[in-house]
Amino acid sequence: MGVHISSGSISCWTERLVVTRVLKIHNLILFRVCIEWIIVIILEDKIDLKAAPSSVCLASTRYFDANDASVQAYASKVVADAVTDVDKIKRLYYAVRDDFRYDPKHFLLTREQFSCRQILLDKRGFCMPKAVLLSTLARTQGIASGIGFAHVMNHLMPDSMLETMGGNRPIFHGYSVLYVAGKWLKASPAFNLSMCEKLDTRPLEFDGRSDALLHEYDNKDRRHMEYIFDYGAVADFPYDMVYYDVFAEKYPEVAQLNS
């Protein structure tokens, strides 16, 4: 395994060795190995998920715009008469999961696409905007939050998405981190219920007390989501890192449109 870090860059490339076949001949074990390259992100100013949150995890920002009137109104409507943080975050989670369609093709990569008020208007988005939405709504209720990142593999990716991505490769995934009842939780509200029912995959449930990360297997016990590497979480959406260090080279046509 090798790692190379470019000068002046916050990212690096690492080899992932994947054993695809094992043969045993007498006392010799032969491995057929496939080398996959994934970009490894070094997050700056990460949240310490073993400690209580600082005030920055409650702040209103350009992306986590918790002070916006439309954001606060929507959160209040969803929370309704819920009293405890556990009940509030559960209601917010299911609203984000099911009322906002998972749409990986709604992939503009503009700064506006990652602001909570714009996501409310879009009513759809891929994993990162939906994570921003949930975390921002949480802040309106005094629940500290952030956004985490990981590389994942979707082993059941539809053919249409495989064509778009050029094959089944590691995906840079975003999820919410939420400080509820004295501890940090991870929750991924990406896949809406109707999509899960259509694809016969398990909807991801969240009880407000334990992590809710994407399922490893589907309803037929087929391999579904695999977490390859978790990078941790930050208190605000790191647009420049996501745009320039993750997606700009992979999707140059989008980068040109937004330049």
Image (tube, rainbow, N blue to C red):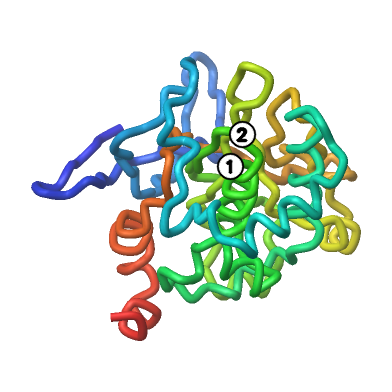
Who is closer to the viewer here, 216 or 144? Answer: 144
Q: Secondary structure at mark 2?
A: loop
- Which labelled disc corresponds to residue 143? 2
Estimate how packed mark 2 is, as few (under 14), some (14 to 19) or many (20 or more) residues with alpha carbons within 10 Å.
many
Q: Is residue 15 above or below residue 60?
A: above
Q: Is residue 113 above or below residue 8?
A: below
Three-letter amino acid code at the position of disc 2: Ile
Q: Secondary structure at mark 1?
A: helix
Q: Residue at x 42, y 46 (%)?
A: 236
Three-letter amino acid code at the position of disc 1: Arg
- Relative placement, left or right, of 24 versus 229 is right
Image quadrant in which you'd find residue 247: bottom left
Q: Residue at x 68, y 60 (%)?
A: 157
Who is closer to the viewer here, 201 or 237? Answer: 237
Q: Is residue 205 above or below residue 51?
A: below
Who is closer to the viewer here, 145 or 229? Answer: 145
Looking at the rendered image, the quarter that the C terminus falls into is bottom left
Label pair 1/2, CB-CB below 8 angstroms: yes
The percent coordinates of residue 4 (x first, y second) are 19, 41
The percent coordinates of residue 231 (x first, y second) are 42, 36
Farthest bottom residue?
A: 257
Q: CA distance from mark 1 to mark 2?
A: 5 Å
- Relative placement, left or right, of 117 versus 101 is left
Looking at the rendered image, the quarter that the N terminus falls into is top left
- Which labelled disc corresponds to residue 149? none
- Relative placement, left or right, of 152 versus 109 is right
Q: Residue at x 9, y 47 (%)?
A: 7
The percent coordinates of residue 162 (x first, y second) are 60, 68
Estimate how packed mark 1 is, as few (under 14), some (14 to 19) or many (20 or more) residues with alpha carbons within 10 Å.
many
Q: Residue at x 53, y 54 (%)?
A: 67
The percent coordinates of residue 6 (x first, y second) are 14, 47
- Which labelled disc corresponds to residue 139? 1
